[in-house]
């Protein structure tokens, strides 16, 4: 790949925000980068892909930045004039992107060497698969969705925009964070019951990546039923995977299942909502199935999420992280924080119904899968969800997978369609 054109001026460096700083530290304990996969139908050439990725990299300085540390030990993004090659081409007869993502998740980023976003391309006569792998200090899942769209625009010579180094979330929230009380304590009743958790072994087995797609007819039925029950699709999925996890673990109905739902701050708080960056807050919920029906459990989850996603609660979540990072803690302190405070069984990262085009000239975006991610917990089951073209796609990523978790969750969803109402 050609290096960045000398005509593109370098923007100034900037300090990492609190969430970026957190992911930078967490990644030093266990890799926390993630992958998204796009399947594209149509005839393309390798040169077209190289030029398109070069064009988009020129647009976003974050794609050609490293993370350096200043004299005070504080990390900052440093845009580089000539970052190393970001595109890798694979040519294997029996290639599956799930196995390639597994390899990519095991391959750490060199933080002091740009780029912190890399691309893997597998191309055949009339089909291409693009894997985008990003350090979590640089991007969230929706950022990668927008990058995929921009690459396809560039591939088909559509107009593309130039962006500067994005401001961190905390800077964007500025006055709203400053107006919050400085006591970030939360109601103890809202803190899920703690379980013993550990970081996954450094020298353990590789992750396993498995997939399943809910087709148009099934998804339409599920959406209609969810509307009738006054619950969200996210809550429907949360209930299904909670019950599936409990069934497969053989856990008691009284044992709560903990779910971690990353919540996008873009709709409420980010003015240029398609910026490349990390704009997330965390919601951890505890669900007890007990003798609840599926739809009653989904309604309970919907109500919890509605309360936890209230703007003030999301702001307090961001403010609490900012306060924790303000002292510039070492990486091992973040490891302690994760094992003491992060106790989820399931990470449910739902990007929702993706509002990007599927047609790009002679090319068609057939599918987007992901995010495929792990935040480093030993028995974590990560479920990435993305809906495109009225098909909901699920990706299960885990270093210690509950085998058959996707199948069990789909079985539960199928049964739920004929289950009696929660009322």
Image: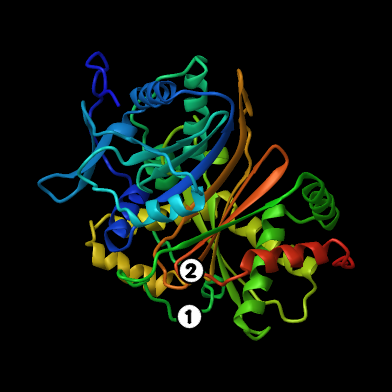
**Number of numbered labels in the structure image:** 2
Q: Residues within 10 Å of mark 2 (few under 14, many from 20)?
A: many
Residue 380 numbered mark, or none: 2
Q: Disc 1 or 2, which lies upstream in sequence?
A: 1
Q: Residues within 10 Å of mark 1 (few under 14, many from 20)?
A: some
* Placement of 168 over or under 360, stated as above or below: below
In this view, the residue in front, 244 or 312, is: 244
Residue at 42%, 23% (x, y): give it. 52
- On screen, 182 above or below 135? below
Query: Residue 69: x, y in percent?
Result: 16, 46
* Residue 321 in sight: yes
Nearer the observer, 286 or 357: 357
Q: Nearer the viewer, mark 1 or mark 2?
A: 2
Q: Quadrant of residue 404?
A: bottom right
What residue do we see at 87% from left, 67% from top? 419
Residue indicated by mark 1: 195
């Amino acid at each position: 790949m050609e290096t960045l054109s000398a005509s593109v001026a370098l923007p100034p460096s900037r300090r990492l925000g609190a969430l970026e700083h957190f992911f930078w530290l967490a990644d030093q304990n266990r890799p926390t980068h993630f992958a998204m996969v796009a399947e594209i139908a149509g005839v393309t050439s390798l040169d077209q892909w190289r030029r398109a990725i070069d064009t988009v990299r020129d647009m976003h300085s974050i794609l050609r930045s490293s993370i350096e540390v200043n004299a005070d030990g504080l990390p900052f993004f440093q845009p580089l004039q000539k970052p190393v090659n970001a595109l890798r081409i694979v040519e294997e007869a029996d290639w599956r992107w799930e196995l390639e993502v597994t390899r990519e998740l095991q391959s750490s980023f060199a933080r002091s060497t740009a780029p912190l976003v890399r691309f893997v391309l597998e191309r055949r006569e009339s089909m291409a698969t693009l894997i985008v792998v990003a350090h979590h200090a640089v991007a969230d899942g929706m950022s990668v969705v927008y990058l995929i769209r921009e690459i396809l625009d560039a591939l088909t010579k559509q107009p593309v925009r130039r962006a500067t180094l994005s401001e961190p979330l905390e800077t964007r929230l500025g006055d709203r964070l400053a107006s919050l009380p400085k006591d970030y304590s939360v109601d103890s009743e809202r803190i899920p019951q703690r379980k013993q958790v550990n970081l996954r072994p450094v020298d353990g087995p590789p992750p396993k990546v498995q997939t399943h797609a809910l087709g148009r007819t099934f998804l339409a039925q599920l959406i209609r039923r969810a509307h009738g029950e006054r619950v969200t699709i996210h809550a429907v999925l949360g209930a299904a995977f909670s019950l599936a996890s409990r069934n497969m673990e053989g856990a008691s109905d009284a044992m709560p299942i903990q779910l971690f739902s990353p919540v996008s701050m873009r709709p409420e708080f980010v003015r240029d909502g398609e910026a490349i960056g990390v704009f997330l807050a965390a919601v951890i919920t505890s669900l007890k199935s007990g003798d609840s029906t599926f739809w009653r459990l989904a309604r309970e989850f919907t109500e919890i999420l509605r309360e936890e996603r209230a703007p003030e609660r999301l702001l307090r979540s961001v403010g609490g992280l900012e306060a924790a990072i303000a002292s510039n803690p070492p990486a091992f302190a973040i490891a302690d924080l994760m094992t003491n405070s992060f106790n989820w069984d399931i990470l449910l990262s739902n990007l929702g119904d993706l509002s990007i085009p599927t047609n790009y000239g002679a090319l068609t975006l057939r599918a987007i899968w992901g995010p495929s991610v792990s935040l480093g917990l030993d028995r974590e089951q990560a479920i990435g969800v993305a809906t495109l073209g009225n098909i909901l796609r699920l990706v299960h990523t885990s270093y210690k997978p509950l085998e058959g978790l996707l199948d069990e969750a789909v079985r539960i969803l199928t049964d739920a369609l004929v289950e009696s109402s929660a009322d």
